[in-house]
Amino acid sequence: MHLIRISGRLACVLSALIACGCALRDVHSFAERGFDPARFHTYRWASADDRATGDPRLDDNPFFQRSVQTSVESELAKRGFEKTTSETADLVIDYYARVTQRVERAGADLVYRSCTDCPPYVYDAGSLMIDLVEGRTRALLWRGWAEGDISGLIDNQSWLEERIGQAVARILERLPRGV
C-alpha cells in the first residue's frame, strides 16, 4: 500500500515536470505544393526590420536573437544548407516570435484528474515561426512553427536558449527531406 502511494506521487511529480518542460510543444508546418528542399543549397537571413515579439524582455535581447539564429543555422547545416551573405541565395530565412498573456480556464488542461474549484490562471503563451522564402521570387515555400506555454523561460537565459534549440530542432524536423 505504501509503495502504491509513493509511486502515485512520483507519477504526479514526473507528469508535472514533463508538462513544464514542454514549452512550445505544439509544432506545425506548411509546405508549398511541389517544394523540394533538395533543389536549394544556399540561404541568407532576411533583414531584421520587424522582429517585435510583443514582450519587452525579448524585443531588444540580442542573446535571444542570436540563440534563434544559431539554432536555425545549426539545423540547416545538418540538412546540407550553406549560409551565404549573397543577395542571390537560393533561400531567404526569416523568423518571428510572439509572446502574449493568456488566461486558462480552471481545469482545462487536466487530463487524468478533475478540479472543481481550481481558479483560472494567467500564463505566457509563446510562438516561434520560421519561414523559408524562395530567394529569387520571394514566394513562401515552407513555414514551420511551435506554440506553447513559456512561463518562466524568458527570465532564465540558459533555460530559454535550451528550449529555443529544442523548439527549432522540432520545427525543422518537419522540413521535407526531398521529393
Image (cartoon, rainbow, N blue to C red):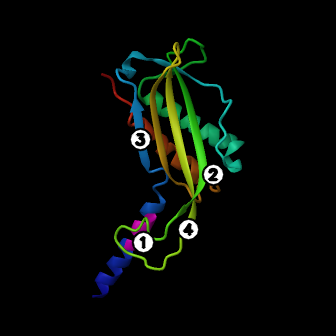
Identified at 36% across, 67% down, the residue is: 111
The tag earlier along the polypeptide, 3 or 4, is 3
User: Circle 4 is placed at which residue position?
Assistant: 121
Location of the N terminus (image quadrant): bottom left
Magenta span includes 114: no
Identified at 36% across, 74% down, the residue is: 113
The tag earlier along the polypeptide, 3 or 2, is 3
How many angstroms separate mark 2 from mark 4 (CA)? 24 Å
User: Circle 3 is placed at which residue position?
Assistant: 28
Labelled pair 3, 2 in contact (Cβ < 8 Å): no
Q: Give the residues in magenta.
A: 12-17
The x, y position of residue 4, in whole percent, is 29, 82
**Within 10 Å of the Cα at label 2, are there few (<14), some (14-19), or many (20+) other Cα atoms?**
few
| SS assignment at label 3 | strand
Quadrant of res 114 = bottom left
How many angstroms separate mark 3 from mark 4 (CA)? 26 Å
Identified at 38% across, 36% down, the residue is: 174
Location of the C terminus (image quadrant): top left
- Check disc 3 and give the amino acid type: His
User: Of discs 3 and 1, which sits in the foreground?
Assistant: 3
Quadrant of res 141 = top left
Most foreground residue, 101 or 128: 101
Most foreground residue, 86 or 136: 136
- Check disc 2 and give the amino acid type: Gln
User: Circle 1 is placed at which residue position?
Assistant: 13
Point out which mark residue 166 bears. none
User: Circle 2 is placed at which residue position?
Assistant: 157
The tag earlier along the polypeptide, 4 or 1, is 1
158 w.r.t. 119: above or below: above
